[in-house]
Amino acid sequence: MTFLQQIKMILTSSKGLVLSLKKKIQNKLYRMPETPPANTLVEPSFSEVAKDVIRNSIRSAICIDDRYAAAYEEDPSGLNVDEPRKLHRSFREDGLCDLDIYRFTTFEETWNGDVMLSNKDLLILDWELDADGNYNNALKILTEVVHSKKIPFVVVYTSTADLHSVSKALVREFSPYNTEVFQAVSSALKAKYSIISDDPDSIEADIFLEENTETFYEYFFNWNNREETESKLLTSFRQSFAVKAQIGDAPIKTKVSAAVRTIAEQHDDGLLELAMMAMCQESETRSPFRIERISTAQHAFRLNGTIVLVYHKQGKEDGIRPENLFTVFAEAVVSSPHNYLNILSLELKDRLRESFSKIGTQFSKTDEQAFFYHLENYRTLNNGQDYDLRSIYDFILKSWIGELHQQKINEQPSILKFASHRYDTLESPPPKELMETDSGLIDELIIYCAYVSTSKVADRSDLSLRFGDLFVNSENPDEFFLCITPACDCLHPKEKINDNFYFAKGANTNKLNAIQRAEKGYYSFVLTDNGPKSVEWQCKPFTSYVVTNDINQFKINYCGSEIQLKHLIVLKENYTQRIANESFGYGHRVGIDLPH
């Protein structure tokens, strides 16, 4: 060994020794123990907090089953007594939740929406309610629940062998498409594909859709495998419609979207819409609701804001025991990859419900003489003989809501603390800068803006014009009108303004520009029959004499023409006020010329 080799060996050995010592020192100084000391506080995970929210928020549930004995059943012989007892106990112990059990006989005898839907958070529904194992009555009840928007969660449990049969039935029942739509899209497909087919006369689109119904269902249900299913469907299109060899997959898919667009103008995925149309080929009616698949391993769907989960009953290999149902349900909601807003909403509703029981206590202690002294200010009807009850109620309601806001303004929901964590785990985070190409996100932002700034009052009792009522021209869907008449004048229009109301006119405008300039300009965001739209207001007020003060049959005079309007929505007060302030300020633009 040469002298240089010896030196090199010594240096190498020394370097290894130094690194070893350094590592030991670092481990001794900086290494954290694998488990924290007993007195160390460990922050709970999102999953743990979310389960607590569900446990605390699901306060009251109902179960409807034709075989379960209800509480105080006069004659429980022949009925299942043990399972409902276990179910009730598990909800009380695991979920801190009261459970009412109803034995189903007939829809007319059993269903009472006023009682069953009141203050309930969860419905457990037997799928086979009918004596012959049919599910027609289960669908009737589910339709009532979904329409009411009162119950956020539904668990459908079934003894059928295949859960997919239940999921397919739900798609057929809660889809905006039917047989008529199926026939229309079949004709549209034939027309679109004839252009790129070697044998257009042989195209039988309806038969193709029928034969591929199962593959279309796979595309709808298997949300995490849609690329593979799409490839399979495009190959089937190519073969069945004899598509020219030089045509690639992209034009084939474009033709699908073009055919679907003849029926559903607004859609993000033409194949998904076609899949729903294919599955509804035998449906007689079109549902006012649209079923959506939730991206989770379970059979889970969203219906008009209600989350529906489908499970097997006890006895199947994957069946749920009654005593485990609440735990399984909570796990399913928490494990959904898009559960953040659902759980946040659940926590907010629960906190508000709790606070509503506390507000107004000071109001009830108010001296009655003082209260009625104040009420004399509202004796404005019938020449001062009668109280203006609407104004009185409006005053009380606003004071209560103000008290609620002050109580809750500093209380942050526990789920909100995980906002940054949720953002970091998004599969596709939002872009830093919005572009015209982000059309899907832009539409979703407009839907979000519409939710924040507008209110849709179902079954509105008072149909007279209000401050903030927003209309669209029945003949021109791009022309909008907003009532900016002060609220006090809207209450008594004949006496105060001789039925001459103030309006602002707006027009459909570029969506991206409206979103980017929303806080600087004067824009509104609305949902119309033609999809989400953005409206830019002119903020130049005009008056119109209103003959029939009814928003459902409303006409105004504008620039010498009578225009029939369709009521869309109510713009919330603070958003309307901003547009009204700018509009009424327009008339104060008085200027003078001075010599320079």
Image (spheres, rainbow, N blue to C red):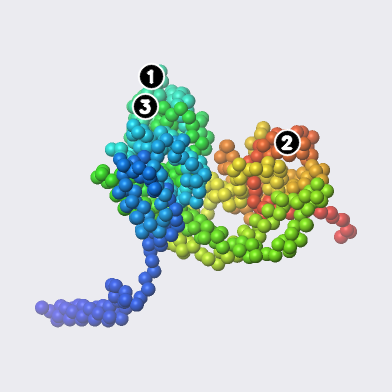
Residue 526 picture quarter: top right
Q: Identify residue type, mark 3.
A: Glu
Q: Which residue is found at the position 50% from the left and 42% from the top?
A: 113
Residue 462, which numbered label?
Answer: none
Q: Which of marks 2 and 1 is in front?
A: 2
Q: For this view, does 593 lie left or right of residue 548?
A: right
Quick one: SS at disc 2? strand
* Mark 2 or 1, nearer chain start: 1
Quick one: SS at disc 1? helix
Residue 210, which numbered label?
Answer: 3
Residue 202, which numbered label?
Answer: 1
* In this view, 217 is above or below 501: above
Q: Distance between the residues labelled 2 and 3?
A: 47 Å
Closest to the observer, 317 or 508:
317
Work out whether residue 409 can be spotted: no
Work out whether residue 566 can be spotted: yes
- Name the spot of residue 72 as percent of width and height, x first: 39, 48
Q: Residue furthest left?
A: 1
Q: For this view, does 284 lie left or right of residue 586?
A: left
Q: Which residue is found at the position 71% from the left and 36% from the top?
A: 554
Location of mark 2 (residue): 555
- Name the spot of residue 199 as percent of width and height, x first: 38, 20
Q: For this view, does 500 lie left or right of residue 55?
A: right
